[in-house]
Image (cartoon, helix red, strand yellow):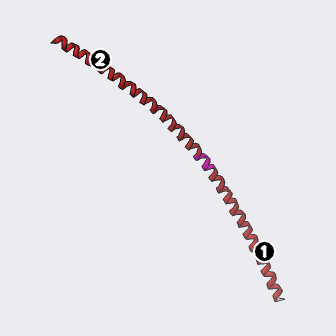
Amino acid sequence: MKNLLKNVSVWILAVFILTACGNISEKVEKKLNDLQDKAESLDSLLNKEVDKVLTLDSLINFESDKVKKLDSLINKTSSKLDSISNEKIKLFEKIIK
């Protein structure tokens, strides 16, 4: 009888432990799924922000090209004005002499 009681007690204890482990396993799986969802959400948000940065970078490059063209035009115009000014100064110096 004692052996039967021990065997039944062991089986009841084993069932209880397995049931408890099953519940823990479900909780762990739920937490992992929640973590996966949060990671995917964060990844999506990060991708959106990276796209914004790339768009801004493209806009900066476009505006930089405009500035370079404008700078080149200003340099050409300045060079022409210097040339005209130098010609007029030389002409004026000839007239004065």
Image side of residue 83 versus residue 14, left or right? left
Q: Position of residue 7 (x, y in %)?
A: 81, 83
Q: Position of residue 44 (x, y in %)?
A: 62, 47
Q: Which amino acid, mark 2?
A: Ile
Which segment is the magenta one? 41-46
Q: Give the overall secondary structure of the magenta segment.
A: helix
Asked if residue 38 is among those painted magenta in the image, a careful observer would answer no
Disc 2 crowd, CA 10 A, few/some/many (<14, 14-19, 20+) = few
| Tag 2 near tag 1, CB within 8 Å | no
Mark number for residue 15?
A: 1
Q: Quadrant of the C terminus?
A: top left
Q: Quadrant of the N terminus?
A: bottom right
Report helix, strand or loop for mark 1.
helix
Report helix, strand or loop for mark 2.
helix
Residue topped by disc 2:
84
Rendered residue at 76%/70% (across/down): 19
Q: Residue furthest top?
A: 95
- Residue 65 occupies quadrant: top left
Q: Nearer the viewer, residue 64 or 30?
A: 64
Q: Which amino acid, mark 1?
A: Val
Image position of 20 with respect to 91: above or below: below
Q: Position of residue 64 (x, y in %)?
A: 45, 33
Rendered residue at 79%/77% (across/down): 12
Image position of 46 with respect to 18: above or below: above
Disc 1 crowd, CA 10 A, few/some/many (<14, 14-19, 20+) = few
Rendered residue at 19%/15% (across/down): 93
Image side of residue 97 versus residue 17, left or right? left
